[in-house]
Amino acid sequence: PPSRVMAPVKAYELRDKSKEDLLAQLDELKLELSNLRVAKVTGGAASKLMKIKVVRKAIARVLTVYNTKVKEAARELYKGKKYAPKDIRAKKTRALRRALTPKEKGQKTVRAAKKATHFSTKKYALKA
């Protein structure tokens, strides 16, 4: 059985790293991948060909963690602001996004408000 050529990159380990470290690791992995692809063309060892998949998955993990960090930072930046970029807003459904807000639902027209004040329902206390 072939020995494990490279320990796969663990996502939980990547989450502790800074953005700069992640980008540096990404560059290293991409360089390694290009070297492996050269080896593939020139007829490299089978272990190198097997390593291509591992490196590609590692690149994907690094990018996933990096993009998650970027998005979290953006969420923190726009927290409490009136407007936010579309990719940060709540997805929900199209209908829910277009639905009236609770404040809008509770509002009455001027005519309805006047009618409610002038002709309010009378409350009578009935003697039992």
Image: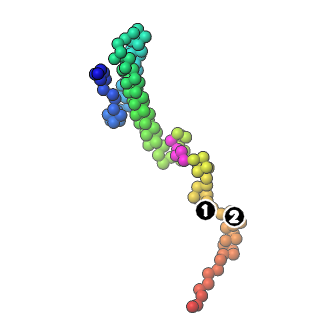
Query: Residue 26 location in percent, x, y?
Result: 39, 25
Query: Residue 119 location in percent, x, y?
Result: 69, 75
Image position of 120 with respect to 33: above or below: below
Task: Give, as a three-letter code, the residue at label 1.
Answer: Gly
Q: Is residue 2 left or right of residue 65?
A: left
- Foreground pick, 45 / 69: 45
- Label 2: how many residues lie within 10 Å, few (<14), some (14-19) or many (20+)? few
The magenta region covers 88-92
**Among all residues in the image, which is located at the extreme top?**
42
Q: In this view, does 109 lie to the left or right of 76?
A: right
Q: The C terminus lies in which quarter of the figure?
A: bottom right
Q: What element carries label 2?
A: helix
Q: Quadrant of residue 20?
A: top left
Image position of 31 with respect to 122: above or below: above
Q: Name the residue under label 1.
A: 106
Res 81 seen here: yes
**Magenta highlight on residue 90:** yes
Q: What element carries label 1?
A: helix
Identify which residue is drawn at 62% across, 81% down: 123
**Contact between labelled residues 1 and 2, with CB atoms less than 8 Å apart:** no
- Foreground pick, 99 / 33: 33
- Label 1: how many residues lie within 10 Å, few (<14), some (14-19) or many (20+)? few
Q: In which quarter of the image is residue 5?
A: top left
Q: In this view, does 37 lie to the left or right of 89?
A: left
The Cα atoms of the two marked residues, 2 and 1, are separated by 13 Å
Q: Mark 2 points at which residue?
A: 110
- Foreground pick, 66 / 8: 8
Q: The N terminus lies in which quarter of the figure?
A: top left
